Amino acid sequence: MSFSFSNCKKDAAAEPQVGKLAIEMDHVVGNSSLVLNAATPNYTTPSGDRFSVSTLRYYISNIRLRKEDGSEYIQPESYYLVDATRPDSKVLTLENVPTGDYTGITFTIGVDAARNTAGAQKGALAPSDMFWSWNTGYIFLKLEGKSPEADNGAFTYHIGGFEGANNAIRTVSPAFPTGTTLLIRTDHAPEMHMKVDVMKILTGPTEVRFATFSTAHMPGASAVKLANNYAAGMFRVDHIHAN
């Protein structure tokens, strides 16, 4: 009897201690909240172009959390499709995260090359209008809307591409607010609030003007320019609730 009890104690001690993390995506345009399908243009770029947004969808994948000692937790099967019209999609829930004190996060905007060529997928990667073909892969980010400055009154940006010069996969590591640590524990689930700024798709290394740059429909130079823009600051960790 005493032998069995001792073994049970060892098994319990060997079980990993894990917790949960929720990452909430808060969509904004500059300093304003994102309001979809406005009847008239409700935003203005720094260059003076007016616009409204009807569609915002994007993939987040391959999430990694970095501990104080530099070690990392890599979330398995880490693929999320965020849709600005679906509140449930704007909260990314990470289960079974090892307990610890984390000081950083890294993730991919889009879908890694391996999953672009891995055949039929399930879950967030199931075939949808976010997938072009087996040759061109997934649309990493889709932004659509209207602008009186565009020739036909509208803009359409479908950004993807995973090969060579057309590779639009971007990995980012938005910093935590100064002095903030993400504490994963077994008895509470912290929430990370991320500001996701649509204006950053239109500004940055390339200043988008709708009159001359209103479409991107396939992998190529236009998609790469837009990917470089959103990788330069679209995602920002605003605050973390310890809960």
Image (tube, rainbow, N blue to C red):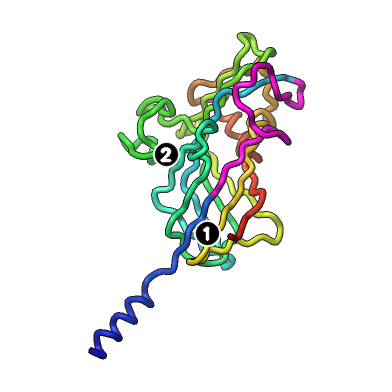
Q: Which mark is residue 113?
A: 2
Residue bounds of the magenta highlight: 23-48
Q: Which percent across, then down, holds residue 119?
A: 31, 35
Q: Check residue 125 for magenta coloring.
A: no
Name the image quarter holding residue 102: bottom right
Q: Secondary structure beneath disc 1?
A: loop
Q: CA distance from mark 2 to mark 1?
A: 32 Å
Question: How far from the left and from the top, in percent, is residue 86?
Answer: 50, 34
State which mark lies toward you, 2 or 1: 1
Q: Which one is nearer the viewer's eye here, 77 or 53?
A: 53
Query: Would residue 161 be seen by someone viewing this image from the given angle?
Result: yes
Q: Quadrant of the N terminus?
A: bottom left
Q: Identify residue for label 1.
A: 189
Relative to 15, residue 74 above or below:
above
SS label for mark 2 = helix
Of the two numbered discs 2 and 1 on the same chain, state the one appearing first in sequence.
Answer: 2
The answer to whether the residues at label 2 and label 1 have Cβ atoms under 8 Å apart is no
